[in-house]
Image: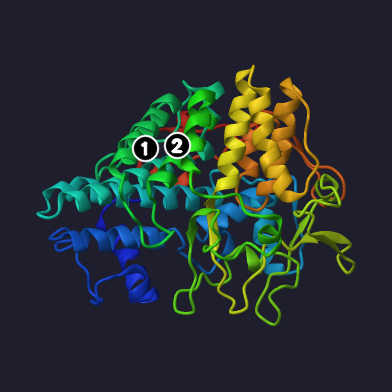
Amino acid sequence: MVKKQNTLYILMAVAMLITSCSKEFLETNPTTQVSDQNLFKSLDGAQTLLNGTYRYLTSKSTVVETSGIISWQNGLDAAAKDIIVFEAQGYMQAYYNHFILASTRADGTLSFNMWQYFFTLSGNANEILANIDKIDGDATGKTQIKSQALAIRAWSYFYLARLFSQTYAIAKDLPCVPYYDKPGTIGKPREKVSVIYQHIVDDLKAAIPGLAGFSRKYKNQINQQVAQGILAEVYLTMEDWANAAATARLARTGFPIMTGDQYKAGFNDWGNAEWMWGQHQTIDATFGNVPSFTLWANKSRGLRWSYDTYCVNDQFKNLFSATDARNQFWKRTDYNLWTSDKFRDNATGTGDVLMMRASEMLLIEAEALARQGGQDAAAQALLWELQDKRGATRITSTGAALVSDILVERRKELYGEGFAWFDLIRTGQGLVRTGDHPRIINLPARSWRLIFQLPTAEFTTNTSITSADQNPYDGVY
């Protein structure tokens, strides 16, 4: 680990929760002083830590590209091929240095910040898991807190595995990341990719039954269907097609696909019935300049601060038919680039941030069915359900062409939501930018440039790894 996974991180998360969130929203204790000695004296203390961990998902810093999961969603999509970052603001040069130029080197701040961020989350989960059973209290309440912590740990390692190693299907025996399942432990060697994924699956399979009957108050919390959704994403990456399809189907039960009009209304309200998981922003607990709304060059924020910098590649824009509700593109003549109205703030400047929705689950199911063979009709039916909602032309292809068309549909439906970079890696497409993209690049499939190196700091604090354990920076696996 870069730093010891101890209560320092936990108290940081709790402190952020208490000082920056409204009490009513996350139901925190009124105290402003929380110590590690009394965190686990009651279920309320454990819940406070869990709330703080959720709050850490939207942590913000003075640097927009290193402010938690919102930054990673924005940046990793921009690192692919469909989104363009226009240099409207000099401050956004950091995005070029890291995401746009895919700077995955060990000495880059991005590698360090991602590593630290997800290990902090998993470390908080470990603290909960190590102590929750010692608390006297309602057994159901303890099970629900424990299950959420298991899901958070699994989700964190899923990100780490995809960022710091080649994808599961081709790299089961490659080194991945160290695995820590107890708080306060440091300095372990890299585990194999297959070992890390087994831990991820085991945690989620343990969490899902423990969340049965858990009725969350807020969509920032992981309930049973969100845990199923994470597991469906994991199975898709593992190319376990049957389980990916079945789990995605379960996950989206009760979450209707939004209409075309709802899609066009803008992605800023977690009250949308399709949203399965999201982060809420209030006047008292804002995400600063980190959310997508501040980045898109669509002038939707009025006089509020905006980086005014995200546009779309013209080749991507051309994928959409005129009748498609998702065809929300218009030309910025001053930039000579196309932009999108998909992400725009609400009237109070406090738009919510999406993390999971039903359309993603539908597309997972459709892709997994199409890849199994013999289920083209079922995959098409799912795709048509989505395309009919969007006013898009139905796809009638079969076989390998159907799989390719579903991957294009993922790009069209989910752009800006944090999937593009990972989809390139897991499907072996490489990174090829064309059209009016100002940063043309051509990286082949399995390029090490698409995989982050372990941060330099890890080699100074972890004696169980040496320079021989580092990922290559260049070349092809």
Give me the residue at 35% from left, 51% from top.
Answer: 3
Q: Which is nearer the eye, 445 or 342? A: 342
The colouring scheme, among rainbow, by chain, secondary structure or one colour, is rainbow
Q: Position of residue 307 (x, y in %)?
A: 69, 70
Quadrant occupied by the N terminus: top left
- Which label belongs to residue 92? none
For the point 35% across and 57% down, the residue is: 216
Above or below 211: residue 262: below
Looking at the image, can residue 391 be seen?
yes
- For this orientation, the residue located farthest to the bottom is 303
What is the x, y in percent for residue 236? 54, 31
Indicate whether 288 appears above or below 147: below
Residue under the image location 78 percent in, 45 percent down: 392
Per the image, the residue denoted by label 2 is 231
Residue type pointed to by label 1: Leu
- Local packing at callout 2 (Cα closer than 10 Å; few below 14, some 14-19, many 20+) is many
- Direction from residue 243 to residue 322 in the image, left or right: right
The x, y position of residue 418, in whole percent, is: 60, 49
Determine whether label 2 and label 1 are within 8 Å by CB.
Answer: yes
- Tell me the quarter of the picture where residue 33 sits: bottom left
Which residue was labeled with disc 1?
Answer: 204
Q: Is residue 144 above or below residue 446?
A: below
Comparing 236 with 306, the one in front is: 236
Residue 2 visible to an observer of this rendering: no
Tell me where residue 224 appears, x and y as whole percent.
Answer: 38, 45
Q: CA gap, disc 2 to disc 1?
A: 6 Å
Q: Secondary structure at mark 1?
A: helix
Q: Amino acid at mark 2?
A: Leu
Residue closer to the observer: 426 or 220: 220
Secondary-structure class at tag 2: helix
